[in-house]
Structure formats: C-alpha cells, structure tokens
Amino acid sequence: MSTLALRLRPSLPWPLWPALGFLLLVALAVIVPGWLATDDPLLADPVNAQLPPSLSHWLGTDQLGRDLLTRIIYGSRYSLLISVAAISLAVVVGTLLGLFAALARGVVDELLSRTVDVISAFPDLLLALMLIAFTGPGTSNLIIALGVASVPRFARVVRAQTFLVLSSGYVEQARTFGLRPLTLITRHVLPHAIAQVPALATLGLGTAIIGTAGLSFLGMGPQPPTAEWGLMLAEGRNYLRNAWWIAVWPGVFITLTVVAVNTLGRYWQARFEGRQP
C-alpha cells in the first residue's frame, strides 16, 4: 500500500462513520427541526388517519392523521434533551460525591460509599420509577429520577480515580511546593479524576434514552399530545394489527439512536483504556 493511501485512510473505525452521521441528523432534528420537517407535529387530520408509508407521508400517519416523520423529528427534542439533562445531572452530582468522598476519607467516605451502594442495588429503571411514583409524572421529575438513578456509576469511578491521583508522585510533589488545597484539587486532581467521565457519560446516555422512552411509555414523562418517542410508542401499541408503522418507526429510531451513541461511547472508552478501537 502506498504512503498516500495510508495518509488518506481514515483513522476512525468504519462503524463510527455511520454512527456519527446518524447522530448529526439527530442533532439537527433537536436544534432545528424545521429544517427537516415543515408540518405541525400536533396538527390532526382525521381524514388521513392511519395512512401507510407513501410518497406524501414517508413513514405514514398515526391514528389522528398526524405525519409520523414530523412527529419523530420533533419528538427527538424531548427524548434527547431529557436524556442529556438526566446524564448531566448525574455527572455533576456523581463527580462531586466521588471527589468529596475520596478527599474526606474516614467516616464521611464510608457513609457516602454505603449510600451509593444502596442506590446502585436497584436497577436504574426501577429506581427511577419508584422516585416518579412519589413525585408524580412530568418532564422535570423524569429528569431528576433518571439523573439520581445514574449517579452511582459516576460517583464510584471518580472516587476510585481520585484515590489513584492522590497517591501519585506528581501530586505529592505539588504538595511539597506548598500549593493550596483548592489549587491542588482543581489543577491536578480533578482533571485526572474525571478523565474517564466523558466516555462513561456517552455510554450512560444510551441507557438514559432507553429509560426515558420506557418511562414515557408508562405515562411517567411528557403527556399527550406531546411528540415524544416513548409516548408515541405507547400510543401506537393498540394499532399494531391495523397500522404497524405507528409504533414500529418510533421504536426503530430509539434503537438506532442508542446503537449510535453506544458505538461512540465504546470507541472513546477503548481510546481511554489504550486499546485498539
């Protein structure tokens, strides 16, 4: 193989390219849905209800005559933003808990670690469902419930990494130079302790998307007539025999999004661990 061919060969593995392309389309749907769909996702047209996929309606229409492609495009806003907000909450809270536990040590570390163990004893979806049962359905409560359920995975990683960083030679050397504790933590400890968090957050985002769809399917998230993937799945389950496309297409987009996000997350994780992606 020539040197030119080696230079032109992409450095990223081939499965990553379609994943990135699909995530770019999803990002456009979230940021500027009007570029991809011009119809109103809430506009009902009973005359054209349950139409199969065609040139006029690429993915068909639902039980109220609303264009499915339009609703899926606009629904990505709710599904993705709820998931991103939940993971962001989990990253912030988990990082602070893990860092504080490792720095405090002793009784504080033991208390926080046992609390995290209790939370992680429950499956994420079950714990989120229990929290929503107390707080009630709604978008904000869904974000908080999914975020709290995801905190343990970040708290454990940051705590373990903080212990490793604190025992490293350059931190000991920085202490001998007389750096203030706050400067030592923000400049030397924290950046290294959270190095694995981006890859972990990307993998967690896939889980959050499934959790968002699952809880919305159960009626715990956004309420009708909101265009949200899990809610669309719930609305279409009663029409599987007569109009399969109402429930199938939202499920397909949930699956493709999760696969694309997990592909990106596993690539980042492999790079962090020094393995060949």
Image (cartoon, rainbow, N blue to C red):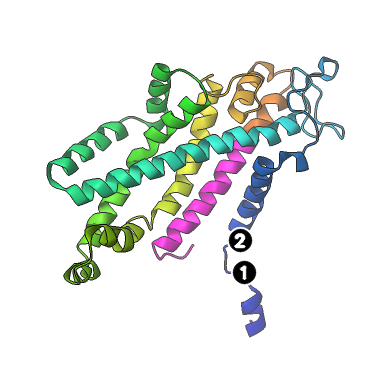
Question: Label 1 belongs to which residue?
Answer: 10
Which SS does the magenta portion mostly show?
helix
Gap in Å between the C-alphas at discs 1 and 2?
Answer: 8 Å
Q: Residue at x 44, y 53 (%)?
A: 198
Asked whether disc 1 touches disc 2, contact meaning CB atoms under 8 Å apart, the reply is yes
Q: Position of residue 18 (x, y in %)?
A: 65, 54
Q: Is residue 275 left or right of residue 95?
A: right
Q: In the figure, residue 155 lies in which quadrant?
A: top left
**Residues packed near mark 1 inside 10 Å, few (<14), some (14 to 19) or many (20 plus):** few
Q: Residue at x 74, y 33 (%)?
A: 69
Q: Nearer the viewer, residue 50 or 143?
A: 143
* Tag 2 secondary structure: loop
Instruction: Give yes or no for residue 268 being in the magenta stretch.
Output: yes
- Residue 185 lies, with reference to residue 215, above or below; the image says below
Q: Is residue 35 left or right of residue 87?
A: right
Q: Position of residue 179 (x, y in %)?
A: 23, 66
Q: Position of residue 36 (x, y in %)?
A: 76, 41
Instruction: Give yes or no for residue 43 being in the magenta stretch.
Output: no
* Residue 267, label in figure: none
* Tag 1 secondary structure: loop
Which segment did they paint magenta? 252-277
State whether residue 88 appears in this view. Answer: yes
The number of callouts visible is: 2
Q: Nearer the viewer, mark 1 or mark 2?
A: 1
- Residue 102 lies, with reference to residue 189, above or below; the image says above
State whether residue 15 appears in this view. Answer: no
Q: In the figure, residue 187 lies in which quadrant?
A: bottom left
The amino acid beneath tag 2 is Trp
Question: Label 2 belongs to which residue?
Answer: 14
**Residues packed near mark 2 inside 10 Å, few (<14), some (14 to 19) or many (20 plus):** few
Q: Is residue 105 left or right of residue 64?
A: left
- Residue 194 lies, with reference to residue 73, above or below; the image says below
